[in-house]
Image (cartoon, rainbow, N blue to C red):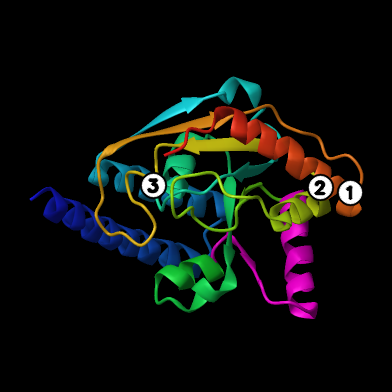
Amino acid sequence: MRALLGVLRFVVAVLNSMFFATLELIVILARGNDRVFHALARNWARTSLRICGVKVRMLGLEKVDMSRNYVYVSNHASMFDIPAILASIPDQIRILYKKELNWIPIFGWGLKYGSYIGIDRRRGADAMKSLEEAAEKIRTGASALLYAEGTRTLDGKLQPFKRGAFNLAVRAGVPVVPLTVNGSYKLLPKRSIVVQPGEVELVLDSPIEIKGTGKEAEMRLMEEVHAAIQKHYVDQ
């Protein structure tokens, strides 16, 4: 029975996501601005968490000046990471996503034509162009969310960090906020559709200013962010 309820929560959450994606497409067609798009995204996040019985505990907000733009760099454990972050951090956060998602009906169209930032993960000129476009949007627009591990953990442990997030952060040149997500893995592990209610803990650390350019700056930043996230991370 518990597993059946978990699957039911997942199905209702998917339907909720499709509903809000449709609303966002309507907003885009009506030429709504980025703030309206983000407000809808936050409402989607809150309703998704309520549907699934997920509560969020937020720590460290006092360390961040919400009048500035940041790159939030986080670990990634579950599909609940994004709604927990959007619902709980009072910032105009734009999510970076892989452009392959653009082809998903309704949901992917909302990503493509909305205010989020698509990244071409292939090698070559197209990938470099998408990185430059993303960096420019971060410099001149709102804050952005990047995942240091590149994908969700399969075992609940912190994975090695990849350079991609830090390459983009250095290109953008805005301060980086280390963000630790605890507890989300057990609610919905990768490759599962059984949702377990529970609590997600988000821990913000002090912003790290970008110093220098190139690979050396990226590696130094990666080490600092890894240390900050590792300090708060709880193996799940």
Mark 2 to mark 1 CA distance (whole Å):
5 Å
Who's the residue at 76% across and 57% down the image? 135
Mark 2 to mark 3 CA distance (whole Å):
33 Å
Q: Nearer the viewer, mark 1 or mark 3?
A: 1
Decide if residue 168 is on the left or right side of residue 195: right
Specify the segment rendered in magenta: 114-140
Who's the residue at 49% across and 38% down the image? 181
Query: What's the amino acid at mark 1?
Result: Glu
Query: What's the amino acid at mark 3?
Result: Ala
Q: Earlier in the sequence, mark 2 or mark 3?
A: 3
Q: Is residue 109 above or below residue 193?
A: below
Per the image, the residue denoted by label 3 is: 45
Q: Quadrant of residue 112?
A: bottom right
Q: Position of residue 13 (x, y in %)?
A: 27, 55
Query: What's the amino acid at mark 2?
Result: Met
Who's the residue at 48% across and 32% down the image? 234
